[in-house]
Image (spheres, helix red, strand yellow):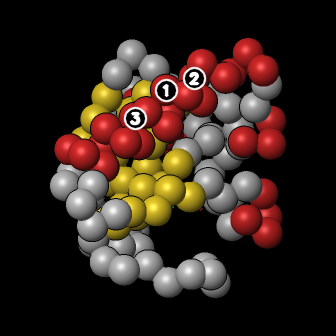
Amino acid sequence: MTLFEKIVARQIPSEIVHETEDVIAFRDIAPKAPTHVLVVPKRVIPRIAEAKADDAPLLGKLLLAVAEVARKLGLEQGGYRVVINNGRDGGETVPHLHLHVLGGRPLAWPPG
Ligand code: AMP
């Protein structure tokens, strides 16, 4: 099981902020902004590079969940950033696709 599958199964505690049949969102354990949430598909896609055409509906649901989470957490007015880290140079550390939602302060661009 991936770390995030264990969170879905409640084997590892987390602060869940949104959940549907297909998607879960919880606060990142090491937040990089005042609000930092991970939006994760319950079915494992290891990383975006390995997504297949069949995954398109689930990928769409993930993006809609991002917008829903941002609304719920009051990020809509100030804005927020959505990040997917893919592979070594992208900074991926957990091989289970996840979208970072970061907000609550101005974010620098370009990222480091
Ligand atoms: P990435 O580096 O893009 O693969 O992102 C993995 C993220 O998972 C990091 O931001 C970690 O802080 C976060 N993370 C690791 N373990 C946990 C956990 N148990 N609960 C919540 N977030 C976690």
Please name the residue shown 60% across and 30% down the image: 59
**Looking at the image, do the residues carrying marks 1 and 2 touch, with CB atoms under 8 Å apart?**
yes
Number of residues whose C-alpha sits closer than 10 Å to that of mark 3, classed few (under 14), some (14–19) or many (20 or more): many
Q: Position of residue 10 (x, y in %)?
A: 33, 32
Residue ID for mark 3:
65
Q: Amino acid at mark 1?
A: Lys
Q: Work out which quarter of the rendered image holds the C terminus and state it.
A: bottom right
Tag shown at residue 19: none
Q: Are marks 3 and 2 in contact (CB under 8 Å)?
A: no
Residue 66: image location, x then y, percent: 41, 42
Find residue 2 and report its horizontal and vertical position in percent. 58, 38
Q: Secondary structure at mark 3?
A: helix
**Residue under the point 35% across and 73% down:** 33
Spatial CA span between label 1 and label 2:
5 Å
Front-most of residues 95 and 111? 111
Callout 1: helix, strand or loop? helix
Amino acid type assigned to the residue bearing label 2 in the image: Leu
Q: Label 2: which residue? A: 58
Q: In the image, 40: left or right of 96?
A: left
Q: CA distance from mark 1 to mark 3?
A: 6 Å
Q: Quadrant of the N terminus?
A: top right
Mark 1 neighbour density, 10 Å: few (under 14) some (14–19) many (20 or more): some
Relative to 31, residue 55 above or below: above
Please give the residue where the numbered disc 1 appears in the rendered image.
Answer: 61
